[in-house]
Each structure stands twice: as structure tokens, then as C-alpha cells.
């Protein structure tokens, strides 16, 4: 198994403590000229818990990862991959906007 880095390990522990299906949590790590990209895959049922109300939980997780990155002299970004069968709804369209179409 590949070596786990502190940022990847931190994200895994954090996400597993928040979700209902911790066994489905998968974090992959890529490094390029832009910094570190952590990609997160979770069970579709857990998507709402990780995104949070209006994205507040996801924003907080990203802030924590930035701090972990700063301590390790790296820019860390998080990509939450949309799982197949996700129950996320399409964005609502305002009634006024609908009439303009």
C-alpha cells in the first residue's frame, strides 16, 4: 500500500468520524505544480453530511486542510467527487428567472 501523508491521513480520519459508512471513505492524493489535490470518494448516502447546509461543512473541511498544508509548506485542495447514485437535487430556479427563459 502507498505511503500515507499527513494531510491525506488527517482527511481520512476526519471524514470517517463524520459519515455513516466509514468503510466507503477513499482519499487519493496527487501532487502537481498547483500543490496537493486530495480527492474524496464517499458513500452517496453520506454526501449531505460532508457538504453540510449550504456547503458549510465542506468549507470548514477545506479550511482545516489549508492549515494542515501550511504546516507542511504545501497548498492543499479538496475535490469531493460526486458519487454515482447521489441524492443531490438540481439547483432550484427562481420563478422570475423561469419566466425570462
Image (cartoon, rainbow, N blue to C red):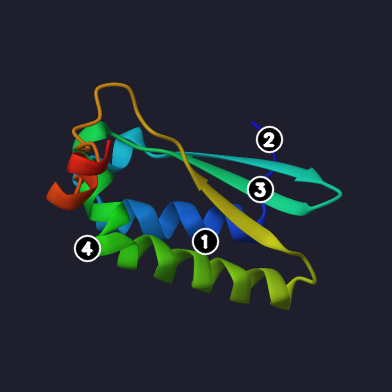
Q: Residue at x 32, y 22 (%)?
A: 84
Image disc number at residue 10 = 1
Nearer the viewer's eye, disc 1 or disc 3? 3
Mark 4 or 2, nearer chain start: 2
- Estimate the spatial distance between the alpha carbons at disc 4 and disc 1, rounded to whole Å: 22 Å
Question: What x and y, as percent, mark residue 91?
Answer: 24, 43
SS under mark 3: strand
Comparing 62 with 43, the one in front is 62
Task: Name, please, the residue furthest toward the front.
Answer: 100
Q: In this view, does 76 lie above or below 89?
A: below
- Structural crowding at the residue carrying mark 2, measured as other residues with C-alpha within 10 Å and reported as few (<14), some (14–19) or many (≥20): few
- Based on the displayed image, in which of its 4 quarters is residue 35 positioned? bottom right
4 vs 3, front mark: 4
Residue 65: image quadrant is: bottom right
Q: Mark 3 points at which residue?
A: 37
The alpha-carbon separation of the residues under discs 4 and 3 comes to 24 Å
Looking at the image, tell me whether mark 4 or mark 1 is earlier in sequence order.
Answer: 1
Residue that mark 4 sits on: 53
Counting residues from the start of the chain, the first of labels 4 and 3 encountered is 3
Amino acid at each position: 500500500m502507498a505511503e500515507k501523508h499527513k494531510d491525506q491521513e488527517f482527511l481520512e480520519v476526519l471524514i470517517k468520524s463524520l459519515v455513516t459508512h466509514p468503510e466507503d471513505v477513499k482519499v487519493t492524493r496527487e501532487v502537481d505544480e498547483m500543490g496537493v489535490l486530495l480527492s474524496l470518494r464517499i458513500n452517496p448516502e453520506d454526501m449531505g453530511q460532508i457538504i453540510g447546509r449550504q456547503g458549510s461543512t465542506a468549507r470548514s473541511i477545506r479550511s482545516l486542510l489549508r492549515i494542515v498544508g501550511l504546516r507542511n509548506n504545501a497548498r492543499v485542495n479538496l475535490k469531493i467527487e460526486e458519487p454515482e447514485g447521489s441524492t443531490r437535487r438540481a439547483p432550484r430556479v427562481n420563478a422570475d428567472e423561469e419566466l425570462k427563459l
